[in-house]
Image: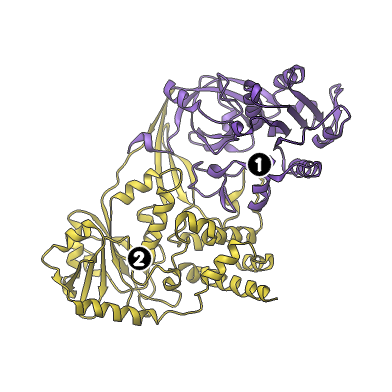
Amino acid sequence: MKARLIEKDDVLKIVDLLREKYDVIAPFSITGRDTYFETVTDSNRNDIRLHLPNPFYPPKRYVFPHIERLMRVKTNNDNIDILVESNVKPLAIFGIRSCDLAGIGHLDRFYLGNAYRDCYYEARRKNLFLVNMVCTEVGVDITEDCFCLCADTGPAAKELFDLQLMDLGDVYLAVAGTQSGEEFLSNPMFKRATEKDIELRRQILSEVRKSFKDTTSWFSATVRYISRGSVLEDTWEEIGRRCLECGGCTYVCPACTCFTVSDRKIGDGEVERVRIWDSCALGGFTRMAGGFNPRKAVHDRRNRRFYRKLAHYFIQRELSMACVGCGRCATVCHGDVGMPSVVEMIRRATAILDEK
Amino acid sequence: MNEVENPYLPKITVLDRVVDEIKDVRTFYWHFEDPNEQLKFKNFLPGQFAQISVFGIGEFPASLPPSPTEEETFFTVRAVGSCTDAFHKMKVGEKFAVRGPYGNGFKMDSYAGKNLIFVAGGIGLIPLRSCIIYALANRQNYERIQIFYGARTPAELMYINDLRKWEQSAGIECYLTVDRATDGWKGNVGVVGSLFKKPNVQMAIKNSIAFVCGPPVMFRFVIKDLLEMGFNEEDIVSTLERYMKCGIGKCGHCCIGSAYVCVDGPVFTYKQIKKLGEDI
């Protein structure tokens, strides 16, 4: 592990350096909980915030856009021309959190693994430079819904970043995770770190880990119950009753992968085919032409969502749960059936059954 | 972006001719504009499917009713939604696009030496047609071949020319039934399961694979009959239909239980279907 130090006043110079090669995305804050990722420009560069609650709208959209054109199709007379354009520019995300990084790791294994490779995802992913920010400020970086500790994704990512930054109090510690990250650290603004700095990192992390709620640490039990199908129908129905079918949980999820595809007219004799994030919470998600819907009931759809995210079969296939512990679904859910609540509801209800 | 690697990119096809099957169902014969694409596509397996693009409207999955042993490529499609309606309105000579083939298909070669029992209802014959033609083209590989097919009325019997041929052919037992006898129908009246118990019918049960495709109600009753007769759950195979957007295991719509129907299916044994835990 190559570790360097960078002065607090210099940390945004990383962004400047990145901007020479990349479009840079960074987190910003409006007021309070309102935070967002945005492209860095000359005018907003000084407003970049490193300590802030993680934005609800996840940075996933920079590798898997909310709406993405797959192709343009021109029709004239008898001729059909299908045009696929690639205009993917090198992109750097500065300040991506460990949970969101794990989300990208999950998307990598899903879109690039299995039988087919998703070329649109691959093109974006290949051009991505990731600067991970370790969450250290309790109450700011780490909110009460955070549970990366239980999902084993944070607060400090162990992989997938090119560069990782961590606030050591007076300075930032920078660690490289890839060859391009290493090259980046050769810039003279980075100073050599000592064994003392590494020890300080260890101490801070061990303190930070104590600040998480421990009520959500029941993943393993829930994974087991869901995988072997022992969750009671009653429990799913209760979860279904609380679901308002808004789809919010899926739109804020860094690990959700579903999309729909739609054709739309963009000009005379010209259409585009786009893919758009879709949500399994919505009633039409599985409705077929002709009206037959195998998953009509809300609790059926909730059942599928959590099965897809937590069942052992998929964990084995993707080498991770499709949950990174970011806590966004818990915050946005009006019915309190985000991941942590569901994990606990299932664990409690099923464990009682087990004891009988 | 390298076109060869883009799994979402359909290839241009031309509509050659259209044949009316039954009400709202037509068979569309077509070919790829690029002969190389045609050659590549012709490696499909019975039970696989393809994605049809009607640009500006959308894309939909459709079974492949031809057998890879046949010359022509075609789809049989029921007009049931916006895409299929638009497809039905296409005229001979017009262009559309296809990508595929997708899915696992029936393991026809692993059924060698077995009896093949086809049980279909309504348009459930579309995916099974491929297997039947394939089995007949490789007749020496299989023992008995039995077809049990039911439709609501005689006018709704699919692939009527094939059916008549199969009824006449040696080496194949083809039994037809309708729910309601109209148009001077002389054959059996009743659900498809009623054929199993007819005195002139001897169902091959031992060493048999049963292919079952049809509407959900028919599926449930036929499965019940077959299990009672002594079929093993793993010797009953079917293909599932689901809402699909990509066909390549990414869009998520067809995910049921531990399976993405588009890549892990659409062919499943009844034993697997039971585990998936969703309605057929």
User: What quarter of the picture does the N terminus of chain A occupy?
Assistant: bottom left
**Amino acid at dot 2:** Tyr
Quarter of the figure with residue B111:
top right
How busy is the neighbourhood of tag 1: few (under 14 within 10 Å), some, or many (20 plus)?
A: few
Q: Residue at x 38, y 58 (%)?
A: A105
Name the disc covering residue B182, or none.
none
Q: Which chain is yellow?
A: A
How busy is the neighbourhood of tag 2: few (under 14 within 10 Å), some, or many (20 plus)?
A: some
- Which residue position is annotated with label 1? A290
**Residue B85 visible in the shown view:** no
- Seen in the picture, residue B126 relative to A32 is either above or below; the reply is above
Which of the pair A195/B154 is nearer the observer? A195
Indicate the chain on which mark 1 is placed. Answer: A
Give how far across and how far down residue B35 sits, in percent: 43, 20
Give how far across and how far down residue A333 sits, in percent: 52, 68
Give the mark, 2 or 1, whose residue is nearer the N terminus: 2
Quarter of the figure with residue B144:
top right
User: What quarter of the picture does the C terminus of chain A occupy?
Assistant: bottom right
